[in-house]
Every structure is written in structure tokens, then in C-alpha cells.
């Protein structure tokens, strides 16, 4: 499993500002169906630069899991369980769900 | 020894004959019940229509699905009058006790002319006693009650797919008293269906799923009408079939059907309850209802073929479609009877592994949607021209991936050639590149399992297998296949021949012969020039070499 699990606590991010280090935002990524299979897990934390959008997060995910890129157009993306189509800025603690369709029955 | 064998053979034959006769009896019994129930219902419906004509004022304002029914049954009109007559005669000739039983079975209140027909009643009439008894627990639910039950028994619901989802959907909809059920499927019942497709029984293996499901539905509730659409749904017939119903339930197992059904529902303005299940996950939503989105609004582009998962590859725990299908039945009942809040503009995600349910809030319909947007491209008039199979690059059935040809066939082995080579005693390594959870189900004797995804990092394992290869005459036909049915296979007697990299072949197999080609390409690039794979993989072995191989 190649995903990095971010272990630092939120205090790390706050200190970062004082130290002049780029502030990071931590987003909880929830994966479903094929995305879960590709990533080898159902959820993990993703650290992105402050001011990043949902589109940046998805771009980061498709770099990590290349196979996700080819199905980018067929995935429902939800921020805090609200379906989104246009990029939205993410905040610390947000939940980003990646939902490819399943068709089995 | 010989006697024992003979006795064994005789016993087996007897048991087989018994099974066959039980099955035959069940099939014919179900067929009889179905036929009788249909005739009786048609009689009731006919009388109901006559009554309606007389009491037009009573039924005014009461949306009648009987009109639709009359339409879809038009060609059978002649036949049905005849059947009704015959049925009346049959009933008269029966003795009172048998007739009482018959009435109970048919859910009528014992009146021959069926004037207090169960399941169908007009406003102003009292409900039949059996009707009240049958649905009493539902009638007692305050928000559903009499009006919900009434609307339900006047509604027509189409269920597309009689599989793992369709099983609980059709069972619950039949039991709950939906007036008319349409069942769509073109497949036959198979043994590998039964762990999840619980509406079908062993007796129906090899029979069309629609007949099996219709029998089960009518066995649950003979007071409803069930129509079988055994040819399946396609672009040519979708609009015509769907327009005969009020609510559509998508219980299919493939992507083109999902787009087809959604489009046809948009074109005919029918709400769609769409469910899917795979592995340990489920998805569910209500599309094309009120201002909610359609399937295309959410998934305008079908996922590329290589990224799709199928029950036949990824597996599915039987209860998962059971849960999703049951929820689909709930949504369909709400839509048909007009109570409660549906899943329109919401998507339910089931994670059966950790028993979690997530709800995703969706948007309304997309103005850019190809099917339901401001400038829709699909209508009832042109839907039949749309090529769903080409659009989704797959067929309207849950078919496996197309056989790839990464390596020319003449540079590969057939399963029969593999068998000869294994028997020849030529030094070799038999490499199986399936995932280990598949390998443990069943495998060829003396094979080495290195999953394709791990081949790169475990190349040394293969190398040492090649280095230490021993040759022995191998006759897989005379051995048990390792795996779940393994009864403790004995160690092979090996007669050593001096091995070398030059004379050691690597035969690569997988389930269907696609991954094995990728493995061979990789192995050859790593210097294993003698690697060769088997066309059609273990599927071909089971089909062409040894049907005893437990293919899954
Ligand atoms: Zn749409």
C-alpha cells in the first residue's frame, strides 16, 4: 500500500504559520468502489497547501493512483457529503469522497 | 470392490432421477399456479373494467392502471375471454372444499364473479375481507394506511434484472401488493446465482429467470398481475415496455443497461429507482423524480472498460445486493403509493465491510445533461437509435472482458498443448499469475502462484523455482485439483533431470488468458525468454481439457 498516512496533529499546521513554513490543510479522503481497490484502502488523510481546492486534491489523488486518472470523468466527488461539480476550497478536517459508479447486481 | 462401485453408480442414478422428478413436478406445479392465477386475474380485471364503465363517476379521479393493462394485453384479448369462460367452468366443477382452497389461494373473497376483487378495488367499494387480512399490518401503518395500499394496488412497477437486486425487490413488491409487476431478464438461472439471487431455487436451474421469479412472486401473492419480459431490455423495446409502468427499478448488472434505462425513464417521464451492489459495497438513488438528477447528470461519461468491476470477477457477498434491493423495494413502494421522502437528489452508499451508510447530497438535474438537460438529445422518438453498447464499449449483459491479443496466438499455447507438455515430463515451471485469493479456490497441480501485481518484486522466487526445477511425468487428469475441494493430495514422485535455464519452460496461466499475456511480456523483457502463456487460461482448461476442473 503506497498511500502515506499523515500522522501529525493539527497543532503542527498552526505552528507552521508562526515558523513561516507553508501552512497545510488536512483533508480526509474517503474512497469507494474501484477507487478503494486502486488505493488499497477506504480512507486516508491528505495534506495539501492552504488554499487548495477540491480539484487540487483530486489532481493529487490521480498522481498517486494513476489508474484513477482515466476514470476521472466518471467519478462523483463529494465534499462533506455534498456533491460538487466546480472546485471548492478545502478546509482542515473536510471529508472528500471519491465515488466511482458500481454497476453490479 | 467392483460391486461397491456398481452399487454406488446405481445409488447415484437413483438420486439423480429423484432430483429430476422433484424438479419436474415443481416446475409444472408452478406453471399451473401461474397460469390459473393469470386467468383468474384477467377475469377479475375484465369485470372490473365493465364495472368501471358503469360507474365512471365513481372511478373518476382515481388513476387507473387498468387502462394501461388493457393496452398491453390487447393482443391476448381473444384468448383471455376464452380462458375466463373455461375458468368459470373449472371453478363450478370443483367440490366446495377445493373451491374454498382455491379462493384462499387466489385471495378472492369467495365470490365467483370476483366482484370484490382483492388487490384491485374502486373508490366507493369496501375492501375485500382477504384484502384487509392480507395487508392488515401495512394498513395499520399510519403514514401508509389504506390510501397507500390502495395506490400501491393500482400501480404498475417494472423491475429490470432478476438477479441479486431483483430477488428481494420482486419478492417484497409482490408480497406488499403492487397491482402489476413487470419482470425483465433474458438470462437463465445458474448454480452460481443462488447464493444471492434468492428468488430462484435449485429446481429452476436452466430455466428463464423471469419464469422462475414470476412463479415465486405469484406463490407469494396470487392476487397480483405479473408480466414476464423474457427478452430483456434494449434500445428498440425500452420505451415501449417502460411506458406500460408507473415506476421503474434498475436492478441490472451492467453499465449500458443503466444508461439505457435512465434515458428511457427520462423520455417517458418515469421515476427510476437505481441500485447497484458489488463486493461489499452498494449504491442507491432515485433518478428522474421531481427536480432531481438522472443517471447521466451524475455520470455523463461511462467509466472506461478497464476500470469496471464485475460480480463475476470481483465477487459479491450475497447479502449486499439483498440489502440494496430491499431498499430499492422501499423506494419503489414510496414512489408508487406517494408517501414518505424518497432518495431523489440523494445517494446512499453502503459499506458492508464496516457496516456504514453514507448519504451524499446530490444536486438537481444538470442543465447540460444529454438526456434531461435544457437541450435534451434523447427522446422517446429517437432513443432506439442510440447505440448504448458502443457508447459504453460493452454489451448489454454482464460479460467478461474481451479476450485481448497482446501476443500473437501462434506464440501462445492452447490448453490442450499445455496438457501434452505437462504430461511429457519436459522440465518446466507452471506459473499461475492470479491473485492468491483466487488461487486458493482452485488451481492446477504443482503450479507456482505469483500474482501479476507482485511479479516484479517476486522475480527472485520465480528464478529460484527455475533453478531448482525438477522434471516429472505429470498427468493432471489423474490428480485432484488443489483448492477448496482438496482432499489432501499426495506428494509427487519426482524423477530428477538436470535442469537448466535453456531447457526450462515457464508456462503462464491465469483465469481467462489476459493477465498471463501481460506476465509473459514482462518476463520476456526480464530475460525469461522461454515464458509462454495459455490462451483462454483456466477457463479454457476447464472447457477444453478437463471439465472436472472447478472453474468459478
Ligand atoms: Zn440528466
Image (cartoon, coloured by chain):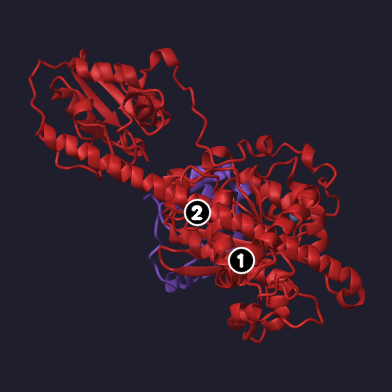
Tell me the element at label 2.
helix
- Residue B251 position, x and y percent, is 59, 54
Q: Colour of chain B?
A: red
Left or right of residue B293, residue A44 in this image: left
| Residue B313, picture quadrant | top left
x 62%, y 48%: residue: A74
Let me know if marks 1 and 2 both belong to one chain. Answer: no
Label annotation for residue B173: 1
| Residues marked 1 and 2 touching at CB (< 8 Å) | no
Q: Nearer the viewer, residue A1 or B120?
A: B120
Residue B193 seen anywhere in this rendered image of the structure? no
Quarter holding ligand 1: bottom right
Left or right of residue B157, residue A43 in this image: left
Residue B535 seen anywhere in this rendered image of the structure? yes
- Residue B511 position, x and y percent, is 38, 34
Q: Which chain is purple?
A: A
Label annotation for residue A33: 2
| Residue B135, picture quadrant | bottom right
| Residue B365, picture quadrant | bottom right
Q: How many callouts does the rendering have?
A: 2
Q: CA distance from mark 1 to mark 2?
A: 28 Å
Tell me the element at label 1.
helix
Amino acid at each position: 500500500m503506497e498511500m502515506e498516512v499523515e500522522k501529525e496533529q493539527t497543532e503542527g499546521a498552526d505552528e507552521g504559520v508562526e515558523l513561516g513554513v507553508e501552512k497545510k490543510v488536512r483533508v480526509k479522503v474517503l474512497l469507494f468502489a474501484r477507487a478503494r481497490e486502486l488505493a488499497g484502502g477506504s480512507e486516508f488523510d491528505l495534506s495539501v497547501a492552504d488554499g487548495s481546492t477540491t480539484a487540487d486534491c483530486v489532481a493529487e489523488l490521480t498522481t498517486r493512483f494513476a489508474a484513477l486518472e482515466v476514470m476521472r470523468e466518471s467519478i462523483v466527488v463529494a465534499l462533506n457529503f455534498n456533491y460538487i461539480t466546480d472546485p471548492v476550497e478545502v478546509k482542515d478536517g473536510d471529508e472528500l469522497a471519491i465515488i466511482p459508479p458500481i454497476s453490479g447486481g | 470392490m467392483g460391486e461397491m462401485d456398481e452399487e454406488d453408480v446405481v445409488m447415484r442414478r437413483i438420486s439423480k432421477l429423484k432430483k429430476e422428478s422433484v424438479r419436474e413436478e415443481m416446475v409444472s406445479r408452478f406453471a399451473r399456479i401461474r397460469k390459473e392465477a393469470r386467468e383468474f386475474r384477467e377475469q377479475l380485471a375484465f369485470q372490473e373494467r365493465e364495472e368501471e364503465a358503469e360507474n365512471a363517476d365513481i372511478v373518476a379521479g382515481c388513476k387507473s392502471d387498468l387502462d394501461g393493462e388493457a393496452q398491453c394485453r390487447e393482443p391476448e384479448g381473444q384468448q383471455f375471454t376464452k380462458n375466463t369462460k373455461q375458468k368459470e367452468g373449472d371453478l363450478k366443477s370443483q367440490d366446495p372444499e377445493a373451491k374454498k382452497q382455491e379462493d384462499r389461494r387466489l385471495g378472492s373473497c369467495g365470490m365467483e364473479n370476483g366482484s370484490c376483487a382483492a388487490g384491485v378495488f374502486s373508490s366507493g367499494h369496501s375492501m375485500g375481507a382477504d384484502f384487509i387480512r392480507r395487508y392488515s399490518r401495512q394498513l395499520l401503518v399510519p403514514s401508509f394506511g389504506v390510501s397507500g395500499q390502495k395506490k400501491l394496488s393500482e400501480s404498475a412497477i417494472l423491475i429490470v434484472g432478476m438477479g441479486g437486486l431483483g430477488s428481494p425487490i420482486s419478492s417484497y413488491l409482490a408480497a406488499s401488493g403492487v397491482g402489476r409487476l413487470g419482470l425483465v431478464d433474458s438470462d437463465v438461472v445458474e448454480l452460481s446465482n443462488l447464493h444471492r439471487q434468492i428468488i430462484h431455487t435449485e429446481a429452476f436451474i436452466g430455466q428463464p429467470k423471469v419464469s422462475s421469479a414470476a412463479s415465486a412472486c405469484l406463490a407469494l401473492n396470487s392476487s397480483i398481475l405479473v408480466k414476464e419480459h423474457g427478452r430483456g431490455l434494449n434500445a428498440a423495446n425500452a420505451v415501449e415496455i417502460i411506458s406500460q409502468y408507473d415506476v421503474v427499478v434498475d436492478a441490472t448488472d451492467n453499465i449500458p443497461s443503466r444508461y439505457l434505462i435512465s434515458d428511457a425513464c427520462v423520455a417517458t417521464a418515469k421515476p427510476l429507482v437505481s441500485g447497484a451492489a458489488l463486493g461489499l459495497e452498494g449504491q442507491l438513488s432515485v433518478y428522474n423524480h421531481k427536480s432531481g438528477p438522472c443517471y447521466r447528470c451524475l455520470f455523463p461519461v461511462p467509466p472506461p472498460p478497464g476500470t469496471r468491476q464485475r460480480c463475476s470477477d470481483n465477487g459479491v457477498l450475497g447479502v449486499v445486493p439483498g440489502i440494496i434491493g430491499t431498499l430499492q423495494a422501499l423506494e419503489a413502494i414510496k414512489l408508487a403509493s406517494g408517501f414518505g421522502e424518497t432518495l431523489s437528489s440523494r445517494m446512499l452508499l453502503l459499506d458492508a465491510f464496516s457496516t456504514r451508510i453514507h448519504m451524499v447530497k446530490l444536486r438537481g438535474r444538470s442543465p447540460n445533461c444529454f438526456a434531461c438537460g435544457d437541450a435534451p438529445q434523447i427522446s422517446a422518438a429517437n432513443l432506439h437509435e442510440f447505440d448504448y453498447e458502443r457508447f459504453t464499449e460493452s454489451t448489454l449483459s454482464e460479460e467478461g472482458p474481451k479476450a485481448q491479443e497482446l501476443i500473437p496466438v501462434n506464440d501462445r499455447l492452447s490448453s490442450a498443448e499445455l496438457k501434452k507438455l505437462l504430461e511429457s515430463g519436459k522440465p518446466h515451471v507452471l506459473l499461475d499469475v492470479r491473485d492468491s485469493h483466487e488461487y486458493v479456490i482452485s488451481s492446477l497441480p504443482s503450479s507456482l502462484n505469483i500474482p501479476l501485481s507482485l511479479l516484479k518484486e517476486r522475480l527472485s522466487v520465480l528464478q529460484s523455482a527455475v533453478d531448482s526445477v525438477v522434471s516429472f511425468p505429470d498427468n493432471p487428469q489423474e490428480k485432484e485439483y488443489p483448492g477448496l475441494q482438496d482432499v489432501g493430495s499426495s506428494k509427487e514422485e519426482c524423477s530428477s533431470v538436470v535442469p537448466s535455464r535453456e531447457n526450462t519452460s515457464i508456462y503462464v496461466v491465469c483465469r481467462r488468458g489476459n493477465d498471463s499475456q501481460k506476465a509473459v511480456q514482462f518476463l520476456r523483457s526480464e530475460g525469461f525468454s522461454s515464458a509462454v502463456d495459455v490462451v483462454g487460461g483456466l477457463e479454457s482448461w476447464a472447457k477444453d481439457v478437463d471439465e472436472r476442473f472447478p472453474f468459478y
